[in-house]
Amino acid sequence: MKRLSEVKRKIAELMELDSKGHKIAVALALIFVCSLFLGYYYVSRLPPEGYNTIYLLDYEHKKAIEYPETLVITISGEVKTFNLWVVVENHMGSNQSYQVLQKVVKNQILSIPVDAEAEKSYSKTLGNGESWETLATVSLNQTGSYSVIFELWIYDSEAEAFKFSYNYCVLNIDVIA
């Protein structure tokens, strides 16, 4: 009999130990899950990273649609022009100096930034949250397919030069006779 009660006691001790081990595992799992939620909350509450943007508006300064797609050159070969608004917005958290390069290339674009001479350049320094609108005039005088590119460049004070921001707009135009 002693032996049976001793076995019962050992089984009870093992079950108690197993119960404690189970409680520790559950507590550790809860701590892990809570730390994941707290980490996610902390990361999601960080201020958003700054950004710049460039976009185009039609001549009437109302929409980002209805851009010219086709221009017709008359027999006299007159130069065809069109106007549109280029808008730059600064959301970087500080003042930024910008440069917009207007380039026109025949056919397709092979790389960005476009390896072509800028036809026009526009520059402005904007405060955080400010936007800048400038009226751009594009002139084309030969038939063909063209890409009109507006590249956004940002002044880098460390390099003391403008660097490409990888923000750009492309407008494809067909000029026909």
Image (spheres, grey):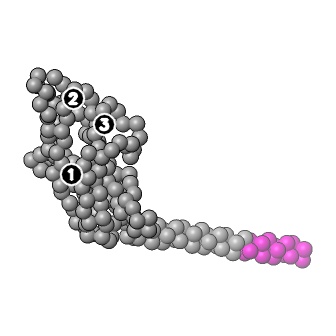
Q: Is 55 placed above or below 108 here?
A: below
What span is colored magenta in the figure?
1-17
Earlier in the chain: of badge 1 and badge 2, it is 1
Residue on which disc 1 sits = 86
Q: Position of residue 131 (x, y in %)?
A: 21, 62
Tell me if label 3 and label 1 are in contact, CB under 8 Å: no
The quarter of the picture where residue 122 lies is: bottom left
Residue 73 is at least partly visible in this image = yes
> Along the line of sight, which residue is nearer the eye, 81 or 51?
81
Q: Is residue 9 magenta?
A: yes
Q: Residue 56 location, x and y as percent?
A: 21, 48
Which residue is label 3 attached to?
105
Q: Is residue 93 magenta?
A: no
**Residue at point 40% right, 36% down?**
110
User: SS class of the residue under badge 2?
Assistant: loop
Query: Of label 3 and label 1, which has the lower sequence position?
Result: 1
13 horizontally vs 88: left or right? right
The answer, for residue 1, to whether it is visible in the render is no
Q: Nearer the viewer, mark 3 or mark 1?
A: 3
Q: Label 3: few (<14), some or many (≥20) within 10 Å?
A: some
Q: Nearer the viewer, residue 64 or 173?
A: 173
Q: Which callout, 1 or 2, points to the residue nearer the camera?
A: 2
Query: Disc 2 designates what residue?
Result: 142
- Residue 118 position, x and y percent, is 30, 46
Q: Position of residue 171 (x, y in %)?
A: 25, 39
Which three-letter amino acid code belongs to the residue tagged 2?
Gln
